[in-house]
Amino acid sequence: MPHASPDRPASARRTSPPTPPQAATPMAFVQAIVRAYAQRGLSPDQALRTAQIAPESVQDSRQRITALQMELLSGAAMQELDDEALGWFERRLPWGSYGMLARASISAPTLGVALKRWCRHHGLIASDLLLHTSEQGSRASITLQERRELGAQREFCLVSVLRNIHGLACWLIDSRLPLLQAQFPFAAPPHASVYPLLFPGPVQFEVEQARIDFDARYLHMPLRRDEAALQQMLQRALPLTVLQYRRDRLLVQRVRQLLVSQPQETQSAEALAHWLHISPRTLHRQLKEEGATLQALKDEVRRDRATELLLRTHKPIKQVAEAAGFRNEKSFIRAFRDWTGHSPAEFRRQPDPA
């Protein structure tokens, strides 16, 4: 289900009161669930009470609810309507349908295989949408193809399906899976400001098809969940789409790649964090959890670049220093000597190890 749940910093002191949950989920998604009840000729009042949402507030599109309220409302509605799709599709998806898709994917050797199974099986239970995974170069995509008019439920449907599969992918590999881009085939809604919380990364509207893009290397990661973990997850599956995983198992590789491909634009932690769509604090914390530091990665990339230029070209030392990301030749010579025990000139005079 599409909940918005941004990262919240921990309290600086233990005596500080806890930060209250942020009400960020737009009322438009509540209205979509109310419409699902209307399609069945049923009342949503009990579900609204369960989520502590005043019925009179539902029509006020300016209001927001918390992720927990959305979870409670969605869970109650799915069971009362016996429809995990909440009115998106021509046929209901009985309670347990999405759990069945997850179970069919859990034995896959890699995330890519698991997502292909999930997409294929989703088409068997709901023909209204076709989901497709693809890989082109360093970019992977999950695309939704609409096979019929989804009407008033269109936005809620497309957002929910993409949030569900993204959340499941994160859970399967027990990792953050940062998005390179999210796209939607409708105009930016009045609550468009919530989309970067739902889909962290660049968001684009008015395109041909709904899709999310991410680093293709995640497709080749092995699954880290088993049947026992699946059974436990299915007892409370809805939070999958709001769970902010602390760990990104490809972060070190992604940082190293950016340092190599964008050396001038990633010299500071702030600039690098901007490319990764996280905060500098989160960047440093996650690297530490992976046993790495930004400075060590910078040094590694600079050393490899300098070594290659010294051995493979005849560039002057000053130009090598600039190409390796140093502001002046003196600091480069000092750093290179720390790395190798030799000055750049001495290193260049050594026999080529290749």
Image: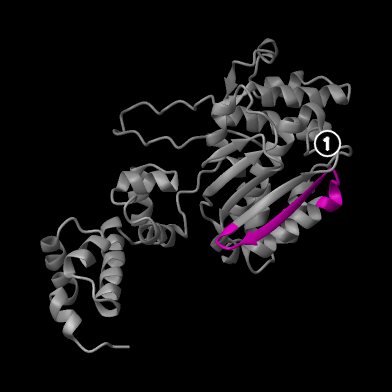
For mark 1, give the secondary structure.
loop
Q: Give the range drawn in magenta.
A: 123-139
- Image location (x, y in percent) of residue 24: 54, 26
- Image location (x, y in percent) of residue 153: 77, 29
Q: Quadrant of the C terminus?
A: bottom left
Residue at the (68%, 61%) spot, across then down: 114
Judging depth in this view, the residue of 216 and 164 nearest the camera is 216
Residue at the (49%, 27%) spot, across then down: 21
Three-letter amino acid code of the residue under disc 1: Asp
Q: Is residue 131 magenta?
A: yes
Q: Which quadrant of the view contains residue 287?
A: bottom left
Residue at the (15%, 58%) spot, across then down: 328
The residue labelled by disc 1 is: 82
Residue 18 in the image: above or below residue 127: above
Answer yes or no: is residue 106 visible.
no
Q: Does residue 70 appear to the left or right of 262 in the view shown?
A: right
Q: Does residue 278 appear to the left or right of 299 in the view shown?
A: right
Residue 346 in the image: above or below residue 196: below
Q: Which quadrant of the view contains residue 302?
A: bottom left
